[in-house]
Image (cartoon, helix red, strand yellow):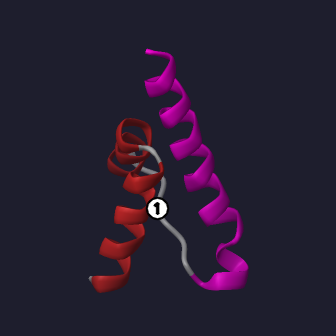
Amino acid sequence: MKGFLLSAVLGLVALALVNLCGAYTGVTLPINRLSLGAAGLLGIPGVTLLILINTLF
């Protein structure tokens, strides 16, 4: 349980950092249920997956 919570927090922090650095990198992710769910359930790999999907489509 502790590992899942740590992964969820790290995913949400990664999502926030991607959006904070978006002005410099040009990569931003919308904050909605899908992105919050992916970041919360999958952690950092979920944020990476969202960035890849956003880049491809």
Query: Hey, what amino acid is under mark 1?
Result: Pro
Q: Quadrant of the C terminus?
A: bottom left
The x, y position of residue 13, in whole percent, is 62, 46
Per the image, is 10 magenta? yes
Give the residue at x 48% y 65%: 29
Residue for point 38% across, 53% down: 46
Task: Examine the rendered structure and indicate whether residue 45 appears above or below residue 50.
Answer: above
> Is residue 24 shown left or right of residue 15?
right
Give the image location of residue 34, x and y in percent.
32, 48
Q: Is residue 41 above or below residue 13?
A: above
- Residue extending farthest top: 1
At horizontal 59% and vertical 53% (from top left) the residue drawn is: 14
Q: State the predominant SS element of the stretch in magenta.
A: helix
Q: What is the quadrant of the N terminus in the image?
A: top left
Q: Nearer the viewer, residue 38 or 42?
A: 42
Q: Assess whether residue 11 is covered by the magenta stretch.
A: yes
Question: x, y percentage for residue 36?
Answer: 43, 44
Q: Nearer the viewer, residue 33 or 8?
A: 8
52 up-or-down from 19: above or below: below
Q: Secondary structure at mark 1?
A: loop
- Kindly identify which residue carries mark 1: 30
6 horizontally vs 49: left or right? right
Residue stretch in magenta: 1-26
Which residue is the extreme one toward the front?
A: 3
